[in-house]
Structures are given as structure tokens and as C-alpha cells.
Amino acid sequence: MTQEAHNGKSSVRTRSSRRECVEPGRFGRFLFKMTPKWMLILLAVLIFFSEVFAMFLLNLLPPLSPYREALLDSTILLTLLSPVYFCLYRPFWLERQRREDEIRRLSRQLIHSEEMTRTRLARDLHDEFGQGLTALQLGIETLRNSLPLGQEKELALCRRLSVMIAQLGNHVRSMTTELRPSMLDSLGFVPTLRWFSQQFSERYPGIRLDMQVVDESERLAPEIEIALYRVCQESLNNVAKHAKARVVRITMIRTKTLLTLAIEDDGNGFEADPCYSPANDYQRYGLLGMRERIAELGGDFSVVSSPVEGTTVRVQLSLAKEEKE
């Protein structure tokens, strides 16, 4: 797997044997998203060319050939059934659009609710639980200082309790930061990603993490920053838990109109189809969550993977709208 950056553009090249497990084919997307207007145009073009082709065949067939009547009947049948098909397709398309809009609305609510829950939990852990641990630590220190000399057993117990409280405080701070890092709001996505990458390297020393950022001069919109951070967070967690990788590369290239983010690993990967199977619920929902976050921003999300060759998570976001605003 190679990755090239030239003139602000990023391209990921993979072997032809690798398969994308998220995006359907171009022709499938074309038919699935076709509006009734374009469907009517397509049917009109189809009828026109079918009649032209039928006239061409009629000129080739003998006057008394039995195929002439069958050809005329099929052409007339196609002409009559095409409007019927269009009338049946339009309600189906409208219903599909309604359901897609409802799914997008529910997805936005779910993502917003998840972020609000993460923020509230992080704040509660920091304010209430963290302050409670601090008060408990001060109480233990006061108790230890008030003990008379010679009570070594009680002093040792106080020291052990102080160490346990300090460890618990570290766990609480780690959980708070993982739920919602405060530096994401104050410093932005790139510094937070660098910090998270450092924490990841310290937690998993057997995985080498390389990071390259091109053009980090300006901050992104808050909704873009949190979406990109969640994609990186989920991808790196998947690498640590499932990939058995030795090297992970994070590359972000930003131009005036386009942002490209790629997370690549050299792990064992997975088959494209099973990523949505019930046997891999955690990974399936993780990929779906990342996809929904990027789709909400109008971007493109893809996962390319195959056994032994690793996995590439790729995000592309258009910044043209943000620049105009």
C-alpha cells in the first residue's frame, strides 16, 4: 500500500484484489438516486432508441416474416408500459426519499445525543467524582497526620489508601478525556490528535504510529473537528483491539476546498462483506457510526480492507461551503 501527496491532493493506491465494503458501485448509486424527472427522461430515450432499432430490424426482415408482427407488438408494449412503470416508480421514489430523510434526521439526533451524553458524563466525572476523590484524599492525609507515633499499621493503611485514590483519580481523568477531551474545544483537532496519538503510543508501545499533517494553519468548524476526532479515535481503537498491526499511519491533507484524512494499518484486515455481519457487531456499528458522522457533513467515507494486507479508513470533506461562510 502506498500513499502519495502532490500539490495538495492525496491518493491511496491499493491492489486490485482489495474490495471496498462500504460504497456501492457507481451504476447502482446512479439508479438508486435517480429522481422521477430523470427516470422519465431515461424512459423516453429508451423508447426512442428501441423504436429506431425496431425500424432497423423491420427493414432487414422479409415482408412475410412472422418475426415482424412480434417485433411490432413488443415495441408497442414497451411504449405502453413505460408510462405505467413511471407512475409506479414515482410513489416508490417519494416514499424512499421520505424514509431516507427520516433516517438522516434520526441519525443526526442520535449523534447529537451521543455527544451531549459524552460531554455531560465527562463534566460530571470531573466536577463531582473528581472533587469527591480530592476531598477523600485530603481527608486521608489529615487522618494520617493526626495519628500518634507508633501506629505504623494505621499509617501504612493510610498510605495504601492514598495510592489507591491517586490511581482512581488517574483513571477518572483518563475516562473524562476519552469521553470528551477539553483541548478539542480550546486547541482544535490537530493538537488533540497529536496528543491522542502520543497517548496511544504510550499505551500500545508495540504499534508504531506515524502522523503527517499538511496545512494546519486554520481551525476547522467545530462539527468537523469532533467528527474527524471520533473517526480517528474509533479507527485507532479498532487497530489496537482487532488488527494486530505493527505500523499505523495517519495522514491529513487540507487544501482550500478539500480535506482528506486517511488512517492506514498493516494489520490482518478483514473481508469486505463480513464487516456488516451480525458476528462482528462491534466493528459493524463502529464503521456505521463513522460513516453516519461523515455523511452528516456531506463527505465521503470508505473502508478498504482485505486479510493480511491491512485496512485503510479514508475520509474526504468538501470545505468549499465552509470557506464561503
Image (cartoon, rainbow, N blue to C red):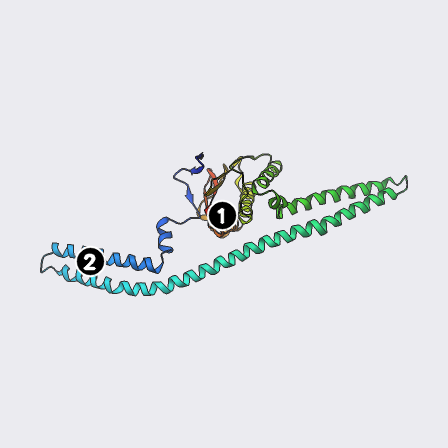
Q: Residue at x 26, y 59 (%)?
A: 44
The mark found on residue 169 in the picture is: none
In the rendered image, the vertical position of residue 259 relative to residue 123, given as above or below? above
Tag 2: Cα neighbours inside 10 Å, few (<14), some, or many (≥20)? some
Q: In the rendering, at what x and y percent does residue 120 appear?
A: 64, 53
Three-letter code, disc 2: Glu
Please indicate whether residue 117 sits to the left or right of residue 24 in the image.
right
Residue at left 40%, top 49%? Answer: 24
Front residue (pair 275, 118): 118
- From what the image shows, is residue 174 above or below residue 7? below
The residue wearing badge 1 is 322
Above or below residue 45? Residue 13 is above
Q: As shown in the figure, which amino acid type bears the numbered disc 1?
A: Glu
Task: Tell which of 239 and 24 is nearer to you.
Answer: 24
Q: Which residue corresponds to the image point at 14% horizontal and 60% vertical from the top-left?
A: 68
Residue 65 in the figure: left or right of residue 185: left
Is tag 1's residue or tag 2's residue first in the polypeptide sequence?
A: 2
